[in-house]
Amino acid sequence: MTTVTRETKETQVRVELSLGKGATQVDTGLKFFDHMLATFARYAGLDLKLHARGDLTHHLMEDVAITLGTAVQRVIPATAARFAERTLPMDDALVQACIDAGGRFFYQGPLKNRLYEHWMRSFCEHAKVTLHLRVLRGKDSHHVTEAAFKALGLALRDAMVDSGTVFSMKGSVALEVL
């Protein structure tokens, strides 16, 4: 398990995260955001305890992305399978998530909702993953956003599977921070 906290003049965030079965306790004060975070953790197979408060929705969501992304980066096995892709339908929405959990940040969206678009970018930056997220169909923003969080969770779950070997021509994708 890893614990990451972030306290600023704008927000207070605490994340406890481990590879598991998707058990969640999430409280940000934003019900739909709580639902998205719990959905992501459930589909990713991550046990998540998250408590956060903030002055503005944008600050809160961004700092949750930073802390959760950092926690995810810490629990990805050094011998993770790395690459995964999932396409997920939810009613009118169809969203594809392609991920590389090899320690390099890149995000390609977009999601129409700017807050959730920014959340995805910030999460990927701090999780040090590459994510290509494609909205193939969908008009209802709730369905598109939820399908995106589910597809991301499922793809990340597959990418974090311990393959028993480093899947890289470099021989290592780990970065040791002293």
Image (cartoon, helix red, strand yellow):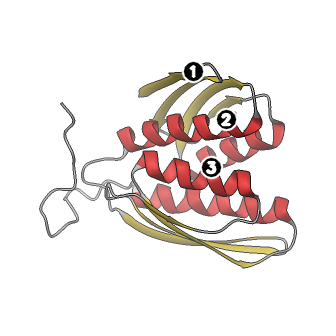
Mark 1 and mark 2: Cα distance apart in space: 10 Å
Q: Residue at x 66, y 25 (%)?
A: 52
Q: Does residue 111 lie above or below 28 as drawn?
A: below
Viewer-nearest of discs 3 and 2 = 2
Spot occupied by residue 21 in the image (x, y as percentages of width and height): 54, 42
Query: CA–CA distance between discs 1 and 3?
Result: 18 Å
Which of the two labelled residues, at mark 1 and mark 2, occupies the earlier sequence position? 1
| Mark 1: amino acid | Thr
Q: Residue at x 60, y 68 (%)?
A: 109
Crowding at mark 1 (Cα within 10 Å: few <14, some 14-19, many 20+): few
Label 3 environment density (alpha carbons within 10 Å; few <14, some 14–19, many ≥20): many
Residue identified by numbered label 2: 59
Percent coordinates x, y for residue 94 in the rendering:
72, 75
In this picture, is 122 found above or below 29?
Answer: below
Which residue lies under the disc numbered 3? 119
Q: Quadrant of the C terminus?
A: top left
Helix, strand or loop at label 2? It is helix
Q: Give the residue type at disc 2.
A: His
Q: Where residue 2 sits: x, y (%)?
A: 41, 28
Q: Residue sitting at 57 percent across and 41 percent down?
A: 65
